[in-house]
Amino acid sequence: MSDLLTPTDEEAIAAAIRRAAASQEPLTVVGNGTKSAMLRPVQAARSLSARNLTGITVYSPKELIISARAGTLLSEIEAAVAEQGQHIIAEPPDPGGPQTIGGVVATNLSGPRRVAWGAMRDHVLGVRAVTGHGELIHSGGRVLKNVTGLDLCKLLTGSHGTLAVITEVTLKVLPAPEGVGTLVLPGLDAAAGVAALSAALGSPYSVSAAAWLPADAAARIPLLATFHGPVALVRIEDFVASVVYRTQKLHDDLGGRGEILDDPGSRSIWRAIRDREPLVAATDGAVWRVSVRPSAGPQVLHSVADACGARGYLDWGGGLVWLTGPASSSAHAAVQSAAHDARGSWMLVQAPETLRVAVDVIPPESTPLARITRRVKAAFDPHGILNPGRLYAGL
Amino acid sequence: MISQPEPKAEVLTRRDTIVAALRGMLPPEAVIAEPIRLRPYKTDGLAACRQPPLAVVLPETTEQVAAIMRYCHAEGIRVVPRGAGTSLSGGALPMADAVVVGLMKMNRILDIDYADRCATVQAGVTNIGITNAVQDRGFFYAPDPSSQLACMIGGNVNMNSGGAHCLKYGVTANNLLGLKIVTVEGDILTIGGRHLDAAGYDWLGLLTGSEGQLAVVTEVTVRILRSPEGARAMLAAFRSNEIAGACVDSIISSGIIPVALEFMDRPAIHTCEEFAHAGYPLDAEAMLIIEVEGSTEEQESLLARIRVICEQHDPISLKVSQSAEESLAIWKGRKGAFGAIGRISPDYLCMDGVIPTSRLPEVLRRIGEMSDAYELKVANIFHAGDGNLHPLIMFDANDPESFRKAEHFGADILRLCVEMGGCLTGEHGVGVEKRDLMPVQFNAEELEQQRRIKTAFDPDWLLNPNKVFPLATRSERSAHPH
C-alpha cells in the first residue's frame, strides 16, 4: 500500500476515480483495512479509502433508520443507536480493529442474529456510491420499503469494493431487546446438537441465535468451559418476562436438561461466538467460512477434520461453519469439496498471501453466470480499476 | 393510455411461423394464439392498460422455458413473463410483438425441508399455497400481500412483494434462499440454494424486485417460519391524523415492534365499515390496527403496554380483541378494503408510495387538498410502521376525463412522496404505471447505471422492455441496441 488517497468528500472520491480511469491505473479500495487479509490481494500502486468521509448524517429513531458517511466507525454508530435503546440488527463481527460502516456493508459480514433477523444486506436501505465511471449514484433511500428500480443496495452490499466506492449508507435499526437469555444443552455431538438447534429454530419462541461448539471450542470461552464437553446454545432476546418464559419453554421442550445462562453471561458468550473467539488460528494458518443448509453443517465439520485436521464450530443453527486449519492448497481443497458436496458456499477469510493468490477464494461460477458477472462488473467499472482480482482472478 | 415501445414489424409479419415453431417445442394446448383466447392475457391488475400479445405459452418445466427463451433470443422476439396477472402496476402488460410466458402451470411444490426450514416450489405456486402446504406442521411463509390467494411466488420474487406483516417479518427479498432462473439466452442457472449469504455478488438480491427485466424465474426456495403461539389485534381510534401518527411514533419508541401496525383515515374507515361491519369507530378521523404475537400472557402484556401508550394520545376508543374471532373481524375490514372501495366506486387506482413516517400528517393534508382540487375522492390505508402509503383514488371509468384526472392525481401523490424523502413504490413495483415517473426519483446517471445492468443480463432488451425504464430516454438505444 504505497500511496493511500483519503479524500474528504464525495466529489473528491469521484475525481480520484476519474483520474484512475483516465490513466487506467487500478485502485485498492479499502475502509480502514481491518479485513484486508480476506479474499485475494489486490495488485495496485494506489489505494482509495472513504475513511475521511465521516459522521452520522441522519438518525431518526422513530423511523428506525440511521444514515452515515462511509468512513464513520461502526462503533460510533453502535453507540449512537444504543443511546436510543436501539441496535444494528445483523450484529456484525468485530475484526479486532476500528472498522468503518462502509467496510461492514461492502463485506456483508453478519453475526449470530443473522439466522433469525437477516444479514447486513437485508438492512441496507440506501447507498450512495461512486462507480468506476466516476459517477455518483444513489439507490434506495431512507424508508423501510422501496422497490423502485433495480436494487443496487443489495448488489453493492458484499461486492467488496469491486463495483463502486460506497460513500454513504442508510441502515434499518430496531429496538434493542430488553433482555437476553441462553439455553445451554451440554454433551450433544454435532448431529444431535444441530437437531436440537433445528427444533429450537422451528419452535414458536423466536430464537435469535443458535450455535454448536465442540469441546475444544467451548473450552476457549470461560463460561462454557465449565461444561467440559460440546455445547449447543440457543439464544432468546426479548422483553425480560418473555426471555424467562421462552428459555424455560425451550428447556422443557428440548428434553428438560440443560442450563439457562443469565443476561450478562449470554451477552458475553454470543459476543465471543460473533467474533470467532472459539477458533484459534495459527498465525500462518487459514480461516474459512462455509455456508450450507443447517443440517449439513456437522458433515462439513467431520469431513474437513478427517481430510486435513481443520477444527471449527457451527453458528446459524448449523448453517455457518467456521473452520481453521493449515494454509495449504490441500486443506483448501478439502474445505472446497466439503462445501461443494453440501451444495453450499465458502470463502477464504484469512490466509497468507501466497495461498490467497494461488486458489479460488470463493466458489467459481458456471460459465453463463460468470459471463453475466463480467458484464455487470464492466457495467460498473469498465476500466477494471476498482479492486481488480479481489473476488475472482482476472476480474 | 400508456405508450408502448414500437412493435417490431419483422416479428409481427412472422407471427404464424413463430406460433408454429412454439407449437413444435411445447404440447399443443400450451401455445395460445387465437385472438379470443388471448383476451384474458391482455391486461393484469392495472386493468386500464390493455394490449393482446402475439402469443401466450404455458410451459410446465424449466427446460421448456429454456427452449422458448433460446428460440425467442435467436429470433429477436420480445418476452413478457407472467404469473397470476395480479400486478397493480401493469407488470404483466404484453406488447403486440411479444410472447407472454405464463408460469401458472408450473404450480408444483417440489420439496419441503422442515429441518432446514425451507420449501422449494415452482414459480406458479400461489403465495398462500406455500403456507397451506406447511401449516399443518405449524409453519408459514411470511410475506402476505393482499392478493395472496391468487398471486404467485414467481411474481412475488419479481416485484419483491410485501404485505401487512413485513414490519416484523420483512419483504420477499428477506425470505428467499434460492432461485432457478432462465436467462434471456436460454441458460438455466441456480442462484443460492438452501444456505444463507453465498459468496460473490448478491444475484438473489438483485433479481428480487427486478420486475422481469433480468431473467425468467422458474423455481424459488423460500424460508418457512414457525408460527407464533398466537396473535391478537386491537383497534385504536383518534381525533386526528396527527394524533394517530404521534401514537405510532410512541409505540415504536417504546421498543415494541408490533407484527402489524395499520393506519386508516376517515374515508377508509367509513368505506370498510359499511362493507365489513367490523365495528370500526365512525366518529374517528384516524384508526390504527395493532397486532402482537406470542403466548396469551405475552399478548396481554404487550397489549397492556400499547394501551397505556394509546391512552396518552387522547383516544376516542380502544378495543382489544378478546378472541381469535374478534381479531379476524378487526382484520376483515382492512383486508376487504379493495372490495369495499370497489362497492362505492367500481373504478379506483391503488397507489403505493412510501414516505418517512414522520411526514404522514403533512402528506395526508396535502393529499386532501389535491382531492378537493381534482374533485376525486380518496381513501388512505397506510402500513404505519414502514411508511408504505396506499391512497385509493376513486374515479368513473365511463368518463375518460375522470380517469385522466385520477392518473394525474396519482402521479402528484407519488411526486409528493419523493419530495418528502420517500419513494415511488414500496411493494407494487414500477411496471408501466410509474415508468415515466422514474426521473422524479433518479437522475440521468442513476437511470443509466440501472440500464447498464439490464443490458448486462439482456443485451438486446428482449425481456419485458415496456416496463420500469422511461421510453423517452432510450430512443437512441432501440435504434442501436448497443
Image (spheres, rainbow, N blue to C red):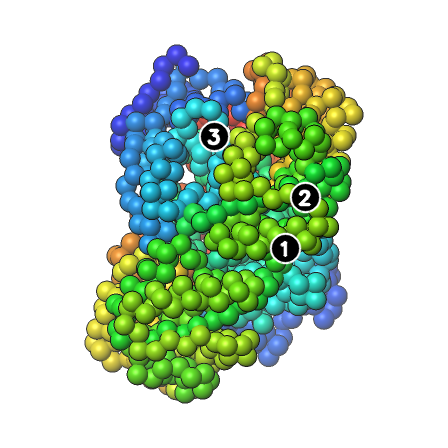
Q: Is residue A347 left or right of residue A264?
A: right
Q: Position of residue B404 (x, y in %)?
A: 31, 75
Q: Are marks 3 and 1 in contact (CB under 8 Å)?
A: no
**Label 1 environment density (alpha carbons within 10 Å; few <14, some 14–19, many ≥20):** some
The answer to whether tags 3 and 1 share a subunit is: yes
Instruction: Between residue B136 and residue B410, name the one nearer to us.
Output: B136
Residue found at x 28% / y 68%: B313
Residue assigned mark 2 = A258
**Label 3 environment density (alpha carbons within 10 Å; few <14, some 14–19, many ≥20):** many
Task: Indicate which disc, 2 or 3, sits on the residue closer to the N terminus.
Answer: 3
Task: Indicate which disc, 3 or 1, sits on the residue closer to the N terminus.
Answer: 3
Please state the chain letter of the residue tagged with numbered disc 2 in the rendered image: A
- Name the amino acid, label 2: Gly
Give the spatial CA distance, label 1 vs label 2.
Answer: 12 Å
- Name the amino acid, label 3: Asp
Instruction: Give the number of the mark in front: 3 or 1.
Output: 1
- Name the amino acid, label 1: Lys
Query: Which of the 4 quarters of the picture holds residue A47?
Result: top left
Q: Position of residue B407 (x, y in %)?
A: 33, 71
Q: Position of residue A115 (x, y in %)?
A: 58, 45
Q: Is residue A178 above or below residue B368?
A: above
The answer to whether tags 1 and 2 share a subunit is: yes
Residue found at x 67% / y 17%: A326
Residue assigned mark 3 = A94
Please state the chain letter of the residue tagged with numbered disc 3 in the rendered image: A
Residue found at x 37% / y 79%: B269
Give the spatial CA distance, label 3 vs label 1.
Answer: 32 Å
Residue assigned mark 1 = A249
Instruction: Between residue B288 and residue A230, name the one nearer to us.
Output: A230
